[in-house]
Amino acid sequence: MTLKQITNTAATNLTTINQSIAFQTANIASVHASNEAGLDLYIENAAGVKFYTLKSVKIPVGVTLVIGKEQLAFNWREYKLVAKLSAGSVDIKLA
């Protein structure tokens, strides 16, 4: 299981390239006291090419978005999983 708290707009690596991973879901909770979270979730290769799973998704305060394994499947030998906020803050659990 991987846990991340993201409170700024910098891209945050949830995994690294060539990191063996075994998770089935991503739980993304909008935890800011008053601002909804704006979120991009994507995979990125070593050349910086991005493929988006979520782009500019708004998650209301107090809401948890659950993403299943079909949407999270990728070649972990060539890509890393990245989250980037445009607003708010989130807790992410990969399990």
Image (spheres, helix red, strand yellow):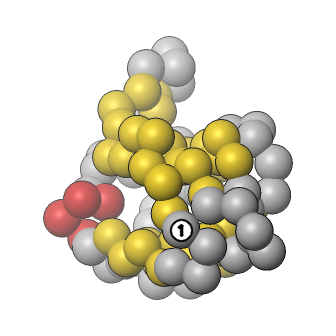
Query: Badge 1 local density, few (<14 within 10 Å), some, or many (20+)?
Result: some
Would you place residue 58 above or below residue 47 in this image? below
Q: How far across and how far down the image is residue 75, in percent?
A: 31, 47
Horizontally, residue 27 falls left or right of residue 75, namely right
Front in this rendered view, residue 61 or 30:
61
Horizontally, residue 67 falls left or right of residue 33, namely left
Picture quarter containing residue 3?
A: bottom right
Q: Which residue shows up at 53% across the image and 68% down it? A: 60
* Three-letter residue code for mark 1: Pro
Q: Which residue shows up at 79% across the image and 74% down it? A: 33
Task: Assign the N terminus to one quadrant of the image.
Answer: bottom right
Q: How far across and how far down the image is residue 47, in percent?
A: 50, 16
Per the image, the residue denoted by label 1 is 60
Secondary element under disc 1, as helix, strand or loop, is loop
Q: Which residue shows up at 57% across the image and 49% down it? A: 38
Front in this rendered view, residue 37 or 75:
37
Q: How far across and how far down the image is residue 76, in percent?
A: 39, 50
Residue farthest to the top?
Answer: 47
Would you place residue 64 above or below residue 5 in this image? below
Q: How many marks?
A: 1
Front in this rendered view, residue 26 or 46:
26
Q: How far across and how far down the image is residue 20, in percent?
A: 47, 62
Would you place residue 38 above or below residue 26 in this image? above
Q: Which residue shows up at 61% across the image and 57% down it? A: 37
